[in-house]
Image (cartoon, rainbow, N blue to C red):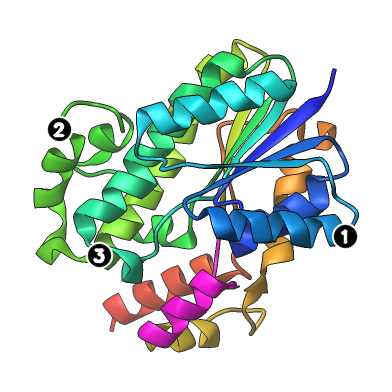
């Protein structure tokens, strides 16, 4: 039976790079907000020999939209993977909107695609190295694990200092890590896997927007052991591995692809705290 790879944020840098790698393994279903960008991505992929490509405009915060996407995927074949790259960075919305898209949106996507999961299906959720900036244990932890709980955003917003978009982003991405851990058992009962990937500073349109708006992004480069930004294809190759049979015993966990930034930042923070 035909394998279907669904990629949310499919017209973005990571989404396109992933489509290029997995596009020859089956049918690609791209999802994003902008139809013109989706059509352009489809044409770009066709020029690279990837022709079995479909797309659908989707707002991942809308349950009916996402259910329609899942129905479209089911009509195309067997769900091999849902690769969820869609999300907002700190300069793209206020704290509430970032939580709605990154946290609740992830919950909605996983809820819609779980019924399609079967033996060999893999869900990959794109998180961020920023997730490691938020302590895993806090008053928000249980709420982050339940992204579809009633009034979850209303519960979380008062816990975010100064209603900062950056803090909301880190918290939302920590939520992605916790959701993956929390749902591993349910997916595993179907013989399916669920994992997350935490990119560092990546050279994508979104990454460039953040770098231009936040001078601290250049400072991050200075504490990155590899001394460069990552590329979209380096995230895509990690995703390609995680959805392959070579990763068949990897589930309920996060893979950092950040050039070594996270542990180095942690060391610097600890050293400053001891001064």
Q: Quadrant of the C terminus?
A: bottom left
Task: Tell me which numbered mark, 2 or 1, is placed earlier along the sequence.
Answer: 1
The quadrant of the rendering that contains the N terminus is: top right
Question: Which residue corresponds to the image point at 56% horizontal and 38% vertical from the top-left?
Answer: 253
Which of 87/77 is in front? 77
Residue 44 screen position, x and y as percent: 77, 62
Q: Residue at x 26, y 32 (%)?
A: 142
Label 1 sits on residue = 48
Q: Which residue is mark 3?
A: 165
**Which segment is the magenta one?**
199-213
- The alpha-carbon separation of the residues under discs 3 and 1 comes to 37 Å
Q: Is residue 105 visible?
A: yes
Label 1 sits on a secondary structure element that is loop
Number of numbered tags placed on the structure image? 3
Q: Which mark is residue 151?
A: 2
Q: Tell whether label 1 touches label 3 (CB within 8 Å).
A: no
Is 52 placed left or right of 176 in the picture? right
């Amino acid at each position: 039976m035909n394998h279907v790879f669904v990629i949310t944020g499919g017209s973005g840098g990571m989404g396109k790079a992933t489509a290029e790698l997995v596009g020859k393994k089956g049918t690609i279903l791209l999802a994003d907000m902008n139809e013109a960008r989706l059509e352009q991505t489809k044409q770009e992929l066709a020029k690279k020999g990837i022709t079995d490509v479909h797309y659908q405009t989707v707002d991942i915060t809308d349950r009916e939209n996402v259910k329609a996407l899942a129905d479209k995927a089911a009509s195309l074949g067997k769900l091999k993977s849902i690769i969820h790259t869609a999300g907002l960075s700190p300069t793209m919305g206020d704290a509430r909107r970032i939580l709605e898209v990154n946290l609740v949106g992830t919950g909605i996507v996983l809820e819609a695609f779980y019924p399609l999961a079967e033996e060999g299906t893999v869900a990959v959720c794109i998180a961020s190295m920023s997730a490691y900036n938020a302590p895993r244990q806090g008053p928000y932890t249980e709420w982050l694990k339940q992204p579809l709980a009633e009034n979850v955003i209303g519960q979380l917003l008062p816990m975010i200092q100064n209603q900062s978009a950056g803090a909301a982003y880190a918290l939302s991405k920590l939520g992605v890590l916790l959701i993956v851990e929390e749902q591993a058992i349910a997916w595993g009962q179907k013989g399916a896997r669920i994992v997350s990937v935490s990119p560092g500073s990546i050279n994508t349109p979104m990454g460039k927007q953040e770098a231009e708006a936040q001078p601290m992004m250049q400072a991050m480069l200075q504490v990155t052991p590899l001394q460069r930004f990552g590329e979209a294809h380096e995230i895509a190759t990690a995703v390609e591995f995680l959805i392959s049979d070579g990763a068949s015993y990897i589930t309920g966990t996060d893979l950092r692809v950040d050039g070594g930034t996270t542990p180095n930042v942690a060391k610097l923070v600890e050293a400053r705290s001891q001064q």
